[in-house]
Amino acid sequence: MNMKRFSVGKLFYNNKFALVFSILAAVVLWVITVLTDTESYPHAITNVPVNITLSDSAQKNGLKVFSPVNTTATVYVKGNSIVVNQLKSSDLQVNAPMASRISEPGTYTFTLSAVKEGSLTDYDVTAVSPEQAIITVDKYKEKTFNIESHITYKDGYTADPSYFVSAPALSTETVTVSGPEKQVSQVNKVAFSYEITDTLTESKNFTAKLVIYDANNNVISGNGITMDTDKVEVTIPVMPRKILPVKAVFTNKPSGVNFTSLDMQISPASIEVAGPADVLSGLTGVELEPIDFSNISPSHSTFTADVNLPSTCNNLSSIPTATVKLDLDGYTARTIAVTDFNVKNLGTGKTATVYTKKLLVTIVGPRDDVEKLTSGNIVGQIDMSDKTDVTGLTEVPVTFSVSGNTCWAYGSYMANIDVK
């Protein structure tokens, strides 16, 4: 079988093919001409920065352009193709000449124009797109807000009564809102929202987006307003809870004195506490601020003491103090003249002379023990450990040791000594 040979040349003898080819060739030639003939056809320079500048007096009055910011435009130019084809966006700048007339806050619409910035100047600007800019001018204002928490619980949520859910802890408590004075003045609060869906039995951590609201609780966005942070790290502490007995604590207690639960009444007797599991498991009770035995006597036997808790625990009972009432039935007080004093912990190489020869001291203890005491059973102790640099005549506090370890001195006392 003989195969016919295909000839390109014969195609041009086909009138339809010749017509189509002519049209396509003309279009291609026209496109090439448009792209290369920068004398007759505008060439587009994209991403040219738009710079709106206010007058010096306007800037001195605190005015600032809030829009447009970081905006670009397209500039169309004609001219020598060698020059035009070298142009970059940095060789031009778009501005609004009329912006220099702005003297007060407001929104203005001005025509944009292009200015040659580079060393290449042999070309003409034919158009700028967009032709106009809406310019927002105002005074700068910033305001700091406490971040509010809008935490909600899903319908049907059931809490576990053995756990306490504390107030959320935020990575930052405040946020600064800044921007046009008019817009910032409308800000009423900054908050985040979060919905809890599952029963909380452990602390929950999440990142939340901050939202700006006006006085009508409408969301404010855009308008040139910015925040120094737009999100916050949130921790919702969840801790086990436990009811613990309240315990009285004493200082300077004679070793022979032992108050039992029958000898004192504490109110409240217990409080409810929440805290980390490892801390709470180590607590057998809640201790009160120590009561100094020098403040205890038959006539002064009721005390109010602060509740002491580890810093990581919460007092769910919201009872900051407790009352301790001591039963001192069988105790008495007696005044005894003390003449024996001992100075200890003097600075190296120093000596001391006690100028106070006698102090009348109120001694408290079991009636039988107090009645047996004499001056010789009591020694005034002067501790100079925190006064090692003292020299000369000075007044210092005195404590007392009483033999038998069942009695103590009530009140505070001072003595004069001379340190050399």
Image (cartoon, rainbow, N blue to C red):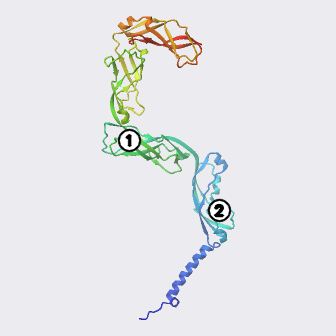
The residue lying at 42 percent from left, 32 percent from top is 311
User: Relative to 205, is 278 above or below?
Assistant: above
Q: Which residue is mark 1?
A: 203
The residue lying at 36 percent from left, 41 percent from top is 202
Side of 306 where 174 appears, left or right: right
Residue 366 image-quadrant placement: top left
On the image, the x and y values in percent for residue 296 come to 40, 14
User: Relative to 347, is 106 above or below?
Assistant: below
Query: Which labelled disc corresponds to residue 20?
Result: none
| Residue 235 vs residue 47, the one in the foreground | 235
Residue 87 image-quadrant placement: bottom right
Q: Which residue is mark 2?
A: 91
CA separation in Å, label 1 and label 2? 58 Å
| Residue 129 vs residue 350, the one in the foreground | 350
Circle 2 packing at 10 Å, graded few (<14), some (14-19), many (20+), is: some
Outermost residue toward the bottom in this view: 2
Q: Assess whether mark 2 and mark 1 are in contact (beta carbons under 8 angstroms).
A: no
Residue 162 image-quadrant placement: top left
